[in-house]
Every structure is written in structure tokens, then in C-alpha cells.
Amino acid sequence: AVECSRGDIVCIWDDDDIFTVDRIRQQVSRMWARKAACSCIGIGYVYSSVEDALHRCKGLPLPFEHSFCFQRSWLSSRKFSNSSLGEGNILFDEFRDWYGEAQPIPPEELPYLYIRTSSSTAPDDSLELYSTLSCIAKSGREPTLDGELLALARALRRERFPSLEGYPGQVALSTALEMLKKAIAEDVAFMRKHHDVAQRLAVGYWQAVGGELCVSQPKWGVAGEAPEGSANASLAPTPVVLATLLPADWNAEESEAIAIGSRSW
């Protein structure tokens, strides 16, 4: 397939996984900025079609080939293994620092849904799945924001995923959206009950989940990150001045900052 390709970039795209509409732009922009030969995306969330549920994932010790993006010249001298599990890992056998070569993008920067079906080959214990109950991590001494899960919520709110109406992937997106709506509603109730937590986290929570939908990321990131895309043209990035779009009372009252439960999706 690589030998038959003519483009400078070769991108692997598993047909059951659901990526954002700006996936290729995000990966290639980072590769160009960092002069990297390849890129992949870390797994942060898993949708199980068997359970019809969204799970968090602690990640894998090696990159998964389904999100690889390569410069064709780099890939042309390497071969995938003839295996149904981890067939892309052999590409990095010669590198001591596979992480530096594979350039994984954190799920917080580029969310996507890894789909688990009854025929999936990756074992559950390697994925280390756990339930998505809250966008606030409460296991430590002080509650903190779960940036990865909030990034997925923001992507869904801003229609960063394609419209898959009539296709199997729509079920996964709808389930993820409903589970995150429920989690956010419970987080809002938790912050209203614990004012000290709200004072520390509420404004950051609101910003991380996407804030006002008219506010878009206007600039490229310092590490080559392209502005976040959207399938909805009205929500796509535009060269705007953020300060002119923020509410006048943005930092005014705690009660306003935690009123996100009533905001539109």
C-alpha cells in the first residue's frame, strides 16, 4: 500500500474508531513544527459496543498503529509485522526512545474514541479500563480537573467529531455525549455543595469544557498545534480576539462560574 501511495504523508485510519474532523491537520502540523517523521495519538477513552458504555483508559506502554501518521520516506524502508495485535510496534524496534520517535499526542490535545467490539484483539487488562463517573478527579488530597475527559466533552460540544447520523459510529458518539452530560451535571452539583472546590476549579472547568461556544481558539500553539476544528462552520476557528468575546462578568462571581449545568450543548 505504501509503495502504491503518492502523497508525502501516509495516515492509518481504522474504520471503526472515531477521530475528529481535524485529526490529520493536528498530526501533520505537529510533525512539521517539530521536524518529526511520524505521529500517533494516545488512547484516553474507549467506547465498548458490547456494553454500550464509555470507559477511561490508563493507556498502553507502546503506540497503537491505528492512529499512526508517517512521512512516506520514513515508512517506505520499514515493514509491519504479520500479526493481528501490535503489528505496528515492530516499526520502532530499532529505537531506544520509541516515544520520542512516535511523537504521541495526548488525548487532552487530540481526543478520539477507540472502539471496542466483540472481535477486538487488544485484551482489557492491557487497556486498564475504568468507569467515567466525573470530570473531577477526587482520589488525591484535593480534587483536580480531569483534563482528558473535559477535552472529550469540549470536542463533543464544539462538534469536533463528524456527523455520523445513519452510521454505527453515531451510537458511540451519542452514548459518550449522554454519559458526559450526566457527569458534568453531577460535577456542577458537587461544586455547588463544596464552595472551596468551586473557587479553585469552576472557572478552569468552564474553560476546559469549551466555555461559550462562540469563543474559538484563534492562534496556533507554540508546539505546532493547529487551532481546534469543527464540523460546524460557525464553530470553526476564526482569527478573533478572545477578550472581546468573554462575558463581562467572567471572573465576577463563583455562582456564575459554576452555572455551567444550565449552559447549552
Image (cartoon, helix red, strand yellow):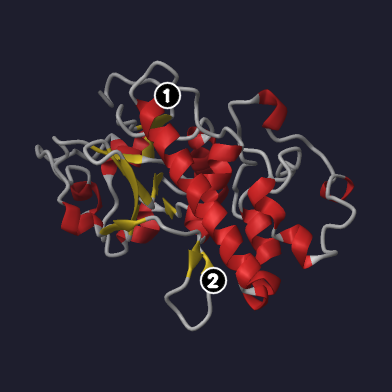
Give me the residue at 50% from left, 59% from top. 135
Q: In x, y percent, where is residue 230?
A: 60, 31
Left of 213 or right of it: where is 68?
Answer: left
Task: Specify whether residue 48 is in view.
Answer: yes
Question: Seen from this angle, which residue lies furthest top?
Answer: 166
Which numbered circle lies on residue 7?
1
In-front residue for pair 22/31: 22
The C terminus appears in which quarter of the rendering? top right
Q: Is residue 152 left or right of residue 230?
A: left
Rendered view: 254 above or below 148: below
Going from the N terminus, do you reach mark 2 or mark 1 first? 1
In this rendering, which labeled residue sits more in front, label 2 or label 1? 2
Q: CA distance from mark 2 to mark 1?
A: 43 Å
Work out which residue is located at the far bottom of the displayed protein and give it: 141
Residue, x 22% and y 43% (percent of image)?
88
Residue at the (52%, 30%) spot, across then down? 21
Is the residue 206 above or below the residue 68 in the image? below
Q: Quadrant of residue 48?
A: top left
Residue 69 point in image, percent of width and height: 39, 38
Q: Find numbered disc 1 in the image and state the secondary structure of the residue it sits on.
A: loop
Mark 2 residue type: Thr
Q: Which residue is located at x 68 percent, y 31 percent?
A: 236
Question: How many residues crowd around disc 1 within 10 Å: few (fewer than 14), some, or many (20 or more)?
Answer: few
Please tell me whether residue 117 is drawn above or below residue 109 in the rendered image: above
Q: Secondary structure at mark 2?
A: strand
135 or 122, nearer to the observer:
135
Residue 144: assigned label: 2
What is the quadrant of the N terminus in the image? top left
Q: Position of residue 46 (x, y in %)?
A: 32, 46
Q: Few, some or many C-alpha atoms within 10 Å of disc 2 (few <14, some 14-19, many ≥20)? A: some
Percent x, y of residue 139: 42, 75
When asked about the image quadrant of residue 188, the answer is: bottom right
